[in-house]
Amino acid sequence: MLLSSVKVKGVRLWSLVNENVISEGGQTKLMFNDLENFKPDDKTIFVIGSSHAYRGYDPRIFKSAGIKLFNMGTSGQNMKDSYTLIKTNKSKIHSLIVDIYPGVLQEVTEESTLMLIQNANENQSALEFLKNNITINSINNMTSRLFDLNPMPLPYQENYIYNGYVEKDIYFKIDTNLSYNKFIPGGNYKYLDSLLNFASNNHIKTWLASHPLKWNASYKNYYQNSYLPQVQKILSKYPDIVFFDFTLNHSNSDSLFSDASHLNQKGVNFYNKKLIEQIKSKN
């Protein structure tokens, strides 16, 4: 109690002695604020996923195509947290894009749980994230939240637009020649199945999507022959779910990327227009 009430230079002592306590603020907080005021209709599309999602789906591009979109992506979002976000907002969601790539289907990490606990607008929602991923750090973050941790400002490098989206205008300049091993499904892989099952049982129209990624011959082989068969195992249970896979379906030009894993605005423009064409062709 004392650590939570005493402040040092405006920051509660609790956060100074617990390095894994996440401060409130940034894209996640702004997304939750927008979500609280967002008024969807029955044709609105929601997006769920990690930084690939919140930096990869631009509501402005969808709006220009006559589609209302809300981006619920957050940094490092694991599938447990994606599942909880959908469950706690199911009354709003009629259509859903689940953004995936190999990294997000491996082990469940704490980053997004801690961030979501701190930034959810309601204590009940924060508690749902805690219940789904109980660790010493998530308990610390919930305690910190209840004692009103001092917020941090939005990081300067993030250009938040609205409805969860962050724009990046930098260009990829460092090539990589990494090799890739066999894909081993982790806890997130199992939760993807649970998430799709929940969406199907609640009549939420769902698509899987992967945006363009930088690739070399090693990554292409790994993706097609190790990772993709595992995704197809899950999809075989849900014949109504379409997978829009643009991972390798692009020019591989550096000009589309801000780094080896994320699109810049030029890449988002390219990808979103192609994705919208595919969504409309399927409906």
Image (cartoon, rainbow, N blue to C red):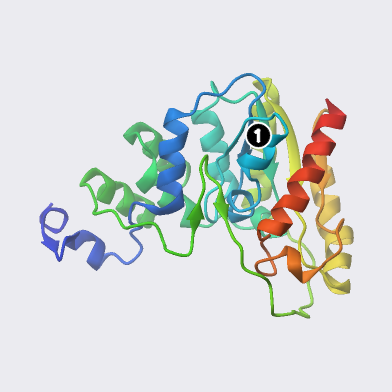
| Spot occupied by residue 274 in the image (x, y as percentages of width and height) | 82, 45
From the viewer's perspective, is 138 left or right of 105? left
Q: Answer few, some or many: residues within 10 Å of disc 1's Cα (few below 14, many 20 plus, some between 14 and 19).
A: few
Residue in front for this viewpoint, 7 or 264: 264
Task: Give the residue displayed 71% in from the left and 58% down from the top.
Answer: 266
Which corner quadrant of the image does residue 11 belong to? Answer: bottom left
- Which quadrant of the rendered structure holds the C terminus? top right
Task: Give the residue displayed 57% in from the left and 50% down from the top.
Answer: 78
Whether residue 210 is visible to the viewer of this picture, yes or no, is no
| Spot occupied by residue 188 in the image (x, y as percentages of width and height) | 63, 50
From the viewer's perspective, is 140 left or right of 74? left
Residue 22, placed above or below residue 191 = below
Task: Give the residue displayed 21% in from the left and 60% down from the top.
Answer: 14
Which corner quadrant of the image does residue 146 belong to? Answer: top left
Which corner quadrant of the image does residue 222 belong to? Answer: bottom right
Type of residue at label 1? Lys
Residue 139, placed above or below residue 283 = below
Whether residue 262 is visible to the viewer of this picture, yes or no, is yes
Residue in front for this viewpoint, 182 or 261: 261
Task: Give the residue displayed 63% in from the left and 49% down from the top.
Answer: 53
Residue in front for this viewpoint, 196 or 132: 196
Q: Secondary structure at mark 1?
A: helix
| Spot occupied by residue 210 in the image (x, y as percentages of width and height) | 75, 50
| Spot occupied by residue 16 in the image (x, y as percentages of width and height) | 23, 66
Identify residue for label 1.
Answer: 63
From the viewer's perspective, is 218 left or right of 261? right
From the viewer's perspective, is 258 left or right of 157? right
Question: Looking at the image, which residue sits at the far front?
Answer: 64
Numbered label tally: 1
Residue 78, placed above or below residue 208 = below
